Image (spheres, coloured by chain):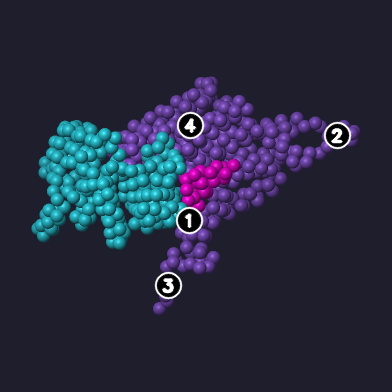
Chain colours: A purple, B cyan
Amino acid sequence: MKNFSHPSRTTGTVGSLWFNFNVPIATSVALGLALFISLTIATPFARANEKTTTTQDQRTADILNDISSAKPTPTSNPIDRPQPQTPGEHWRELISFFAPGLITAVAIGIAGSVCGVLVLLRREALLALALPQVVAAGAAVGLRLGWPTLPPALLAATAALLYLVITRRNRRHGNADAALPALYISGLSLSFLIIAGASAHVEELQNLFTGIDVAVTPARAWTAAPILLVLTAAIAFPWRRWLLIAQAPAAAELAGVNPGRWDALFLVLLTGVLLLGTDSQGVVMVLAMLFLPAATVLPWARRIPTALAAAAAISLLMVAGAFIASNIFSWPFSQSAGGVGFALLLLSHLSAMLLD
Amino acid sequence: MLIQLNNCVFGYDKRPVVQVEELGLHAGRCMGIFGPNGAGKTTLIRGVTGLLLPMEGVIRRHESLRIGYLPQHRALELHWPMTGLDAASLAISARTPIGRIDRDNREKILASMSQLNVTGLANRPFAKLSGGQQQRLLLAGALAAEPQILLLDEPTEGLDVRSQQTLLELLRDMTVKGLCTVIISHEVQDLMFLADSVAWLHPAEMPGQPSHVEILPPAQLAERMVHVRQSV
């Protein structure tokens, strides 16, 4: 008779560690990694044979064309001909041109990643997924009526929060669990229904979902970035309070702390980050920054402050990686941030599984 | 006398849940709370501590009363990354403006941890500690906040026999030193070891009526429980 040992008890060698994985998780992680690597390698070759940019949105293409056309044309006189740019000069020029977009992306990255750690720990991921869709629906109203997008988006987010608070207070009616998925799909559907027939604005709405790339105005950057950083501080500093109301709400109440009010404050701060982030650089960038850095660092985190700092550092890596990738491969910026974040997430989770 | 209740009824939305004729909490004494699930133990505790106003009756409380709470270690959300020191800091963090722990408070927590012999666990991941170690850390934190009354919710639930005994002895020492402890427990043995008196909640026989509280010595509770088991 053969003596079979349980796979989960097999330890010792790297090969045997493979059997310690949950097979479906390990398979999907491996497939994801393979897909990402193949896309990374294949896309530049595919792009070399293409005459037109297909993944890059029109607005970014226009901006890149503007940069090319702004460069002086070569002259026949060698004295008049400008010296060729060094790579350093080339990148400095790009950074200076895209500075507003980069500053906003960094602020969204820091704010999103710090919020994201607490969102995942508080198990509020579905809320964070649903709110940007609601914000987009509000913004669609603004686009349709020719107003600025932020005020109607703010109204929509406030209405959604009120709806959530009411449904959570009346849990026994059974609609609290349905509220978030309902808001998610309603926001996704309504935003396009509101804009249907107004073809001039459809592209703007699509940009709001897929990312507005680095075409952010300086005015928007200097407004959004400081507010996002203030919201980050307001979320990060009371980290012990979030820990307390998650672990011992009764102890909090006995000490005069109202967990309900702190929960409401967290929702308001999170909504602020999602609202400003979505309105500045689109749903993809906000969600990438919210979930990927947090999910990357949490398997390694021993304390909340270190998790918050590490997530913020990962978000900066994502912005830097996305900026380089989007300029070298002409990839869209937000999706590049998501791709870099996903690669880091896979590395982190694979390492954690191997070392577990 | 720290808290005294007379002819109080506690409930929610005009629905009475629990009725208590007389109940007093004193320094250096331990009160046990015993009763089946749904009898209103939580409602009674909320009423006693002032988190729930009485629908009827009178409550007298000592001025500026500090009430601590030791949560069930099984009820903690262990996916939150925290060290032993972070967990022990929970109780004091509830009493500072945004939960910040300054140097004085940190020293208080460390001193309390040293008293309970858990200083070595300060930097260890809380989730990886045993149930007994987790409970001792939380107790050290709760005591560091210098409460006059300490509420304990099923403190020995899920602990091995040795950890149970260690924890119960610690709690008895604290009570002897003057702390008032209120222990919610299904374990008659724990109540016999610790409590001076037990509030036994009897569910109402008629729907819509509140449970009523009977105060009795723990030995009498044990005796009656033996009778109940024999009759079953």
Q: Taking B231 as reference, is A7 left or right?
A: right
Q: Which mark is residue A272?
A: 4
The answer as to whether the residues below labels 1 and 4 share one chain is yes
Q: Which residue is mark 3?
A: A4
Q: Secondary structure at mark 3?
A: loop
Mark toward the start of the polypeptide (3 vs 4): 3
The residue where tag 2 is placed is: A81
- Circle 1 is placed at which residue position? A25
**Parent chain of label 4:** A
How far apart marks 1 and 2 lie (CA) works out to: 58 Å
Are the residues flagged by discs 4 and 2 from a single subunit? yes
Q: Secondary structure at mark 1?
A: helix
Which residue is at a point 52% across and 32% down the rendered structure image?
A: A230
For the residue labelled by badge 4, is the local secondary structure a helix, a strand or a loop?
helix
Q: Nearer the viewer, mark 3 or mark 4?
A: 4
Which mark sits nearer the N-terminus, 2 or 3? 3
**Is A300 one of the magenta-colored residues?**
yes
- Please rate how many residues cluster around mark 3, counting C-alpha atoms within 10 Å: few if below 14, some from 14 to 19, many from 20: few
- Label 3 amino acid? Phe
Q: Are callouts 3 and 4 both on one chain?
A: yes
Magenta segment: A293-316
Q: Are marks 2 and 3 on the same chain?
A: yes
Residue drawn at the location 50% of the way across and 40% of the way down? A114
* Position of A152 relative to A173 (above/below): above
Amino acid residing under circle 1: Ile
Label 2 to label 3: alpha-carbon separation: 76 Å
Q: Determine which of the numbered discs, if any, sits on residue B74 in the image.
A: none
Quadrant in the rendering for residue A162: top left
Instruction: Point out the frontmost of discs 1 and 2.
Output: 2
Q: CA distance from mark 3 to mark 4?
A: 55 Å
Confirm whether residue A11 shows in the render: yes
